[in-house]
Amino acid sequence: MTKKMVEKITNMDEDFAQWYTDVVTKAELIDYSSVRGSMIIRPYGFAIWENIKDALDAEIKETGHENVYMPLLIPESLLQKEKDHIEGFAPEVAWVTHGGDEKLAERLCIRPTSEVLFAEHYKNIIHSYRDLPKLYNQWANVIRWEKTTRPFLRTLEFLWQEGHTCHETEEDAHEETVKMLNVYADICERVLAIPVIKGRKTEKEKFAGAKYTYTIESLMHDGKALQSGTSHNLGTGFAEAFGIEFLNREGKLQPVHQTSWGFTTRIIGAMIMVHGDDKGLVLPPEVAPTQVLIVPIAQHKEGVLDAAYELHRSLKSSVRIGIDASDKKPGWKFNESEMKGIPIRLEIGPKDIEENKVVLVRRDTGEKIQVENANIEMEINRLLTDIQENLFQKALEHRNNKTASAVNMEEFQEQLTLHGGFIKAMWCGKQACEDQIKELTQATSRCIPFEQENLSEECVCCGQKAEEMVIWAKAY
């Protein structure tokens, strides 16, 4: 029974894509829907998202933002007001052409993002510098008609938050862009135990309609990168297109400076691929719906279930705790708790009751620890903290081991073939070289990191004078 349970998940080093699919379905995070590329987020998967959302929402509110909600549908004429924006999103837009049996006079776009809706609203409510800043955020769903899909990582419909803000000065907008990128980095590293690299996207990779885009990039177990959150300085482009003007302190009309930033359910995919193993999920305690699972051993024997439920009652106020009192065998329960990534398994049986002890088993290392009843709560809290930190350090070590430098294309290709991962290399700033690198290696520019290194004076591709160091990788 135990062996069969483990065999249900493909070995991650044999077929990483299939391993990922096995994990998201068998750990009951998602189910497939009848619409291609759409997913049903099941209760366990949604509980993880809620924990991420709660942590991020708290930080968004701490930084002075208010939550709002914008409509799902956008008139085509409104979407086309900002030329670069519509050109960037046109291939991914889904259109509503009929209302009931009637053809609409104007097509309605199902939002791929909400810049134009916020811009239209801001035009109506901003008149003076006293109205600024406007710091809004919405939690919503969006539709992007993706050609290739994978649960969480790239789906037609996904959940996210999108922040949209207006500011008096360019400096204020820049400060906001950096601030929210740092919030995303904090959520990834502190809550999800995913180390990230912060940097700026190239002109080619920036958000459509943005002045510049900042990003956090993370590295998956298979050596591919994942964009994990972006923060955009929109400059005055949308303000000029939509007429969002205010009377400044000198009594003159000027356009506002805007930002937008987003964090999506794809981060769940990142968490799975950064921490998971051949047994299934490995969840950071901060986001685990169940942090501790009690598994009674020989539960048919007198007093075992009573002791298990008493433990549950005494601990539920300090930790997210569950109990598996089903009639399945302990081995099956162990495997299921491991597949679902529960950070700590608490085992209690007749012998443990006799000795006033329990056994705690760590999901990240498999270590078993005997703990006296008097110390259970303290030890669980210590272990949860230690597991969270261990997962981060393990992911950081993995990223460091899969980061290399290259000063020419021969080295670039060799390093990428050898271990995948991040390649640090100098770049001249020309899109032609960026395109050629992608054509030759399938690697894309992930970001121009804020922490720069001078690896060489020459561009890795053309050999001309280099402008900055770029992180490159194959990516999801």
Image: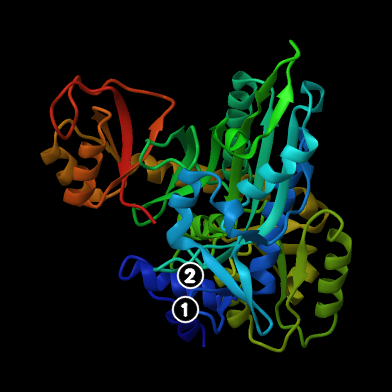
Q: Is residue 110 above or below residue 465?
A: below
Looking at the rendered image, the quarter that the C terminus falls into is bottom left
Query: Does the residue at mark 1 contact the one at mark 2 (Cβ under 8 Å)?
Result: yes
Seen at 88% across and 69% down, the residue is 310
Residue type at tag 2: Lys
Q: Earlier in the sequence, mark 1 or mark 2?
A: 1
Say whether residue 383 is visible: no
| Position in image of residue 133 (x %, y %) | 74, 28
Seen at 53% across and 42% down, the residue is 230
Which is more toward the observer, 413 or 6?
A: 413
Which is more toward the observer, 161 or 282?
A: 161
Seen at 53% across and 77% down, the residue is 25
| Position in image of residue 216 (x %, y %) | 49, 40
> Label 2, on which residue?
279
| Position in image of residue 88 (x %, y %) | 44, 50
Q: Is residue 217 above or below residue 408?
A: below
Residue type at tag 1: Val
Seen at 39% across and 75% down, the residue is 10
Which is more toward the observer, 132 or 328?
A: 132
Give the CA distance from mark 1 to mark 2. 6 Å
What is the number of the mark on residue 299? none
| Position in image of residue 393 (x %, y %) | 49, 42
**Left or right, residue 371 beside residue 39:** right
Q: Is residue 458 above or below residue 195?
A: above
Q: Is residue 250 above or below residue 423?
A: above
> Label 1, on which residue?
6
